[in-house]
Image (cartoon, rainbow, N blue to C red):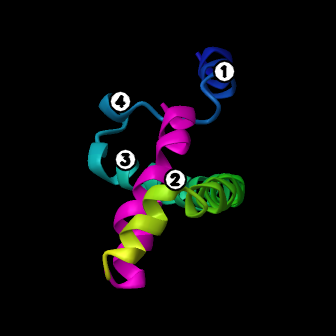
Amino acid sequence: GDIVEALAHVFSFGRLYPELAGQTWELIVDGLRHLALPVLVLAYFNLAGWSRYTRGSMLEVLRQDYMRTARAKGLRERIVIMKHGLRNALIPLITILA
């Protein structure tokens, strides 16, 4: 009895099974709260690489002829960068993420 419960506790990494505990939602919410910080840290770590890749891609896109053409049309710089530049710079990043 006690040995089996102890082994079940060790091999389940200390998790309680919600159907056995009777506190399904409390355990789910508690588990999500404990996952929040690791998820944020891992996302922040990856964000640095993605931003460097996006910056490099954006520098390459800004030198393209269609960017010069968009500026020559008289579009505002923000529109040129966000609509024409960033859209095309994100294509390689989306390819990597997919």
The label shown at residue 89 is 2
Q: Is residue 79 left or right of residue 85?
A: left
Q: Residue at x 71, y 59 (%)?
A: 52
Q: Position of residue 91 (x, y in %)?
A: 47, 43
Q: Residue at x 48, y 67 (%)?
A: 68
Mark 3–mark 1 Cα distance, whole angstroms, equals: 19 Å
Q: Residue at x 57, y 53 (%)?
A: 39
Nearest to N terminus: mark 2 or mark 1:
1
Q: Nearer the viewer, residue 58 or 23?
A: 58
Mark 2–mark 4 Cα distance, whole angstroms, equals: 51 Å
Asked if the residue at tag 4 contacts the one at tag 1, i.e. Cβ–Cβ closer than 8 Å, the answer is: no
Q: Residue at label 4?
A: 20
Q: For residue 90: magenta?
A: yes
Instruction: Please say if 12 is above or below 25.
Output: above
Nearest to N terminus: mark 3 or mark 2:
3
Mark 2–mark 1 Cα distance, whole angstroms, equals: 46 Å
The label shown at residue 28 is 3
Instruction: Please say if 82 is above or below 1.
Output: below
Question: Which three-letter amino acid code belongs to the residue tagged 4?
Answer: Leu
Q: Residue at label 1?
A: 11
**Boundaries of the magenta span:** 75-98
The quadrant where residue 76 appears: bottom left
Q: Position of residue 40 (x, y in %)?
A: 58, 60
Asked if the residue at tag 1 contacts the one at tag 2, i.e. Cβ–Cβ closer than 8 Å, the answer is: no
Mark 2 is surrounded, within 10 Å at the Cα level, by few (under 14), some (14 to 19) or many (20 or more) other residues, namely: many
Label 3: which secondary element? helix
Q: Position of residue 41 (x, y in %)?
A: 66, 59
Label 1: which secondary element? helix
Nearest to N terminus: mark 1 or mark 4:
1
